[in-house]
Image (cartoon, coloured by chain):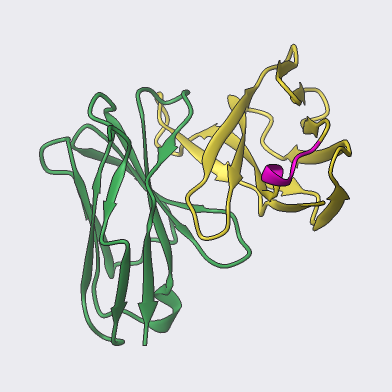
Amino acid sequence: RKEVEQDPGPFNVPEGATVAFNCTYSNSASQSFFWYRQDCRKEPKLLMSVYSSGNEDGRFTAQLNRASQYISLLIRDSKLSDSATYLCVVNMLGNSGGSNYKLTFGKGTLLTVNP
Amino acid sequence: DTGVSQNPRHKITKRGQNVTFRCDPISEHNRLYWYRQTLGQGPEFLTYFQNEAQLEKSRLLSDRFSAERPKGSFSTLEIQRTEQGDSAMYLCASSSSGNQPQHFGDGTRLSIL
């Protein structure tokens, strides 16, 4: 089983649609969770951190369910500028222990918002 | 610009040549990470530094790869005797502590002819 698995996509939605991305992770000891967005041929950029209580940032809502090892991202009222690849990211303790973490990325889900 | 800086942005070289990439992290970040990303995949962890100490290396990092961070500031990643399979985007990231989000540079795109 892959460490982080995401919806394979791609998603094509009209402007104004609501779209949801799902992600599961295999390591129950994972410490922190993020959604990054990556535009074509660009670097990943942090979209938002994900907390157990759920968190919202404008049109974006992220949820974490530690018991199910499941993370989600909801985008409401999607805009053309939301078109990008969305990466589910889990921060795990590295093999060297201590406070050494490494990010493990899903493959990403491509979203295209159409006019 | 106080973000993570990488250079060169692009590198094209013949198979068998050595290449070196540089990363300058955000100045107050003591943790620095290297990742590799190929088309259609998410970034894959290569190695990690806390200050000048290299604390973890992925199994992806063969003995042709070496990374340094001699003064705990910038880092270099060298690939010796490049192979076509090394063609990828090499991303550097930094963070202020282990559990905080990492911030990425623009990456170095390597193409092996």
Q: Is residue A3 visible?
A: no
Q: Which chain is yellow?
A: A
Front residue (pair A81, A18): A81
The image shows a total of numbered marks equal to 0
B101 shown above or below B19: above
Q: Residue at x 28, y 45 (%)?
A: B5
Residue toward you, A20 or B84: A20
The residue closer to the viewer here, B84 or A67, is B84
Q: Horizontal and vertical percent for residue A110?
A: 72, 54
Image quarter where the C terminus of chain B lies is bottom left
Most extreme residue toward the top, as rendered? Answer: A53
Looking at the rendering, the stretch of residues picked out in magenta corresponds to A78-82
How far from the left and from the top, in percent, is residue A25?
Answer: 72, 39
Q: Which chain is assigned green?
A: B
Q: Is residue A63 above or below residue B12?
A: above
Q: Is residue A58 left or right of residue B10?
A: right
**Coordinates of residue A71 in the picture (x, y in percent):** 76, 31
Location of residue A62 with respect to B81 vertically, above or below: above
- Identify the image quadrant of residue B8: bottom left
Quick one: B7 or A25, which is closer to the camera?
B7
x 61%, y 27%: residue: A48
Taking the spot 81% from the left edge, 50% from the top edge, the residue there is A7
| Residue A97 in view of the camera | yes
In screen coordinates, is B55 left or right of B36? left
Q: Report x, y in % for residue A38.
A: 58, 48
Q: Residue furthest front?
A: A115
- By secondary structure, the bulk of the magenta-drawn segment is best described as helix
Residue A100 in magenta stretch? no
> What quarter of the picture does the N terminus of chain B occupy?
top left
